[in-house]
């Protein structure tokens, strides 16, 4: 069937056809443009390659294909070079300037590679800053310290079975020491302590490459690092027990954790050594609950006072909050009998309501009220220039609240001494997490020593923590036991009459150099002659086959080379030959044994 096509339809068809033709032409033009761009890029690449291949020809060639000059440097094409360029090169093998033999040990190589000047600087700086008077740090003690540093690196932190193994022995030793070294008072305080750590805390393929578990507590001054649940004596504030918080999953496998949860189980483990003593445990809201008070009585035979906040199951928190307290310092008491044991819930209306669970103490008014420190202007009319006056506001409180607050700050005081006073974790820079934890435990030991000194010493002077640390540092640096008391340096300190001096070290060295001179003929030394006579007169001396004392001895400083030189002043003073290497035998760039000997004497003076 045919129908007529209107003019409009015909125009529409023609327009569509023209648009299709125009779009096709546009696409063709775009394709041509793309092909032109690709061809231009290809030609550019080809041109750059050609220029690179012909870069030498662009330089000055002077018509010689085997010669090229670049920036004034002339290069010529040559054949194979068959003779050593620029003549024979150095042919000797690597060698050491220090004599070695088949009996050389690892220590010999260490002493060879450790700069002697650095050792001297360390000894001088240590003795200078600690104001050593009679027993300065010596070479032997410094070597012992280096040995300890190296030994600390041998522990491995990549232990899948127990990631805390590098530090666990230190914690166990700390706990055993406190158990056998101190009998705490009537009150035990439980709280948290932090070991600061800002380093790695991650695992790679189940291998620990950083701190196994990082705890973050925003309210702590050092709130990122290792958390320790700790127990201290409320009377002396000495730390008694530590427990590492290893993470949620490991702590769930600890003793009592399944039955009592985190806080109560930690408290039961920390107090195991004082079971049946009927002491009172004081703890904050991280531990406090009715369940904790019951568990301590059931498993440990201990009393409990705790500040309740969130763990209020079976505790009348809502009732105490609704009670109409009239004045600040008012309190309310509720009592319960559980399995024949009396427990009381106490609400104390301070600035904010505080609630306590207790299995001991009383609720009568305490003899000592709570003192709140306040400030006010001496002249209320003039608030700009008038001096500020400090006064204390008294708030009454019951005896159970007094018992809590008098002991609850024990660990906080200890933490402040360790982190705010000693600050060993800040001074000891390390990227090894078990070194940082050891620094934490080391700081606890030092703080405990100060607290014990202040509390137990019958004639203890009134010392600040810093003064105690200075004295302790001096005594540790001058400490000498039987196995240390060897070597010429030890004998030198033992016999030398020394006295403190305020003269500069350079002045003392100059005076010593004028008197401590080296002599070469050891046979004429009175000490040598005396020993020779004793040997010849000794009836048992016949076993020596006529041998006389050697005229060469090992140097008393380096203990390596034999020498016939000796210090005349020290030999006469100690009645024993003090051999010193000849300064002329010292290689350039090395410190002579005589200079080191004089520095040691100067530091001692």
Image (cartoon, rainbow, N blue to C red):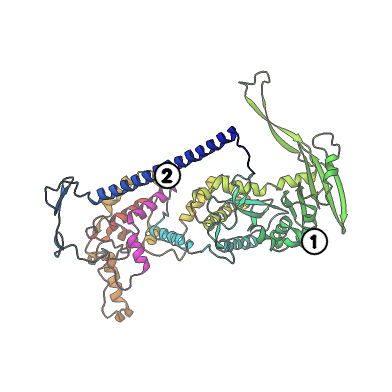
Residue found at the very far left of the displayed protein = 63
**Would you say residue 27 sits in the magenta stretch?**
no
| Residue 358 on image: x %, y % | 80, 50
Q: Mark 2 points at which residue?
A: 31
Q: What residue is drawn where x is 34% and y is 44%?
A: 40
Give, as a single range, the part of the protein colored magenta.
100-129
In the image shown, does 272 or 49 lie closer to the viewer?
Answer: 49
Report which quarter residue 392 is drawn in.
top right
Q: What residue is drawn where x is 31% and y is 54%?
A: 598
Residue found at the very far top of the displayed protein = 381
| Residue 81 on image: x %, y % | 15, 63
For the stretch drawn in magenta, the main secondary structure is helix
| Mark linked to residue 298 | 1
As helix, strand or loop, the secondary structure at mark 2 comes to: helix
* Up/down of 25 relative to 469, above or below: above
Q: Is residue 334 left or right of 150 when viewed as pictured?
A: right
| Residue 58 on image: x %, y % | 19, 46
- Give the mark nearest the N terminus, 1 or 2: 2
In the image shown, does 144 or 183 lie closer to the viewer?
Answer: 144
What whole-number distance in Å separates the C-alpha atoms at marks 1 and 2? 91 Å
As helix, strand or loop, the secondary structure at mark 1 comes to: helix
Near mark 1 (Cα within 10 A), the count class, few <14, some 14-19 or many ≥20, is few
């Amino acid at each position: 069937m045919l129908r007529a096509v209107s003019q409009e339809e015909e125009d529409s068809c023609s327009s569509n056809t023209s648009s299709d033709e125009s779009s096709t032409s546009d696409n063709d033009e775009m394709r041509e443009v793309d092909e032109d761009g690709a061809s231009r890029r290809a030609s550019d690449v080809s041109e750059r390659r050609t220029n690179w291949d012909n870069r030498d020809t662009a330089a000055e060639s002077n018509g010689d294909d085997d010669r090229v000059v670049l920036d004034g440097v002339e290069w010529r094409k040559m054949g194979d070079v068959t003779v050593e360029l620029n003549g024979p090169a150095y042919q000797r093998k690597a060698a050491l300037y220090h004599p070695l033999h088949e009996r050389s040990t690892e220590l010999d190589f260490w002493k060879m590679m450790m700069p002697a000047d650095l050792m001297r600087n360390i000894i001088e700086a240590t003795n200078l800053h600690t104001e050593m008077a009679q027993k300065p740090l010596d070479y032997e003690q410094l070597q012992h310290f280096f040995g300890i540093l190296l030994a600390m690196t041998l522990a491995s932190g990549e232990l899948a079975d127990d990631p805390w193994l590098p530090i666990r022995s230190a914690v166990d030793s700390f706990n055993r020491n406190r158990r056998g070294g101190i009998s705490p008072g009537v009150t035990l305080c439980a709280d948290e302590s932090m070991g600061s750590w800002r380093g790695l805390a991650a695992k790679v393929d189940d291998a620990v490459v950083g701190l196994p578990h990082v705890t973050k507590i925003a309210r702590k001054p050092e709130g990122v690092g290792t958390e320790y649940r700790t127990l201290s004596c409320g009377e002396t504030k000495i730390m008694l027990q530590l427990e590492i918080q290893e993470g949620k999953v490991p702590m769930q496998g600890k003793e009592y954790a399944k039955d009592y949860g985190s806080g109560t189980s930690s408290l039961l483990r920390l107090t195991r050594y004082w079971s049946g003593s009927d002491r009172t445990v004081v703890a904050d809201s991280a531990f406090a609950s009715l369940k904790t008070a019951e568990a301590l009585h059931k498993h440990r035979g201990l009393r409990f006072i705790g500040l309740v906040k969130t763990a209020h199951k079976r505790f009348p928190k809502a009732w105490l909050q609704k009670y109409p307290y009239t004045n600040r310092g008012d309190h309310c008491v509720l009592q319960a009998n559980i399995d024949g044991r009396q427990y009381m819930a106490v609400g104390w209306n301070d600035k904010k309501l505080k609630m306590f669970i207790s299995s001991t103490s009383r609720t009568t008014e305490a003899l000592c009220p709570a003192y709140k420190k306040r400030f006010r202007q001496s002249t209320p009319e003039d608030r700009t220039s008038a001096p500020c006056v400090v006064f204390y506001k008294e708030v009454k409180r019951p005896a159970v609240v007094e018992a809590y607050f008098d002991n609850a700050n024990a660990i906080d005081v200890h933490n402040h001494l360790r982190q705010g006073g000693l600050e060993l974790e800040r001074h000891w820079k390390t990227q090894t997490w078990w070194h940082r934890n050891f620094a934490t435990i080391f700081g606890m030991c030092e703080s405990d020593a100060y607290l014990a000194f202040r509390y137990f010493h019958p004639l203890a002077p009134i010392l600040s923590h810093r003064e105690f640390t200075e004295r302790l540092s001096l005594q540790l640096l001058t400490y000498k036991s039987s196995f240390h008391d060897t070597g010429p340096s030890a004998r030198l300190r033992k016999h030398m009459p020394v006295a403190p001096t305020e003269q500069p070290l350079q002045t003392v060295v100059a005076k010593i150099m004028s008197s401590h001179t080296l002599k070469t003929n050891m046979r004429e030394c009175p000490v040598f002659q005396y020993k020779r006579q004793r040997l010849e007169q000794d009836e048992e001396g016949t076993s020596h086959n006529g041998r006389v004392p050697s005229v060469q001895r090992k140097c008393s400083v380096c203990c390596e080379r034999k020498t016939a030189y000796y210090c005349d002043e020290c030999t006469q003073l100690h009645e024993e030959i003090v051999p010193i290497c000849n300064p002329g035998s010292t290689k350039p760039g090395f410190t002579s044994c005589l200079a080191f000997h004089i520095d040691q004497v100067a530091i001692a003076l």
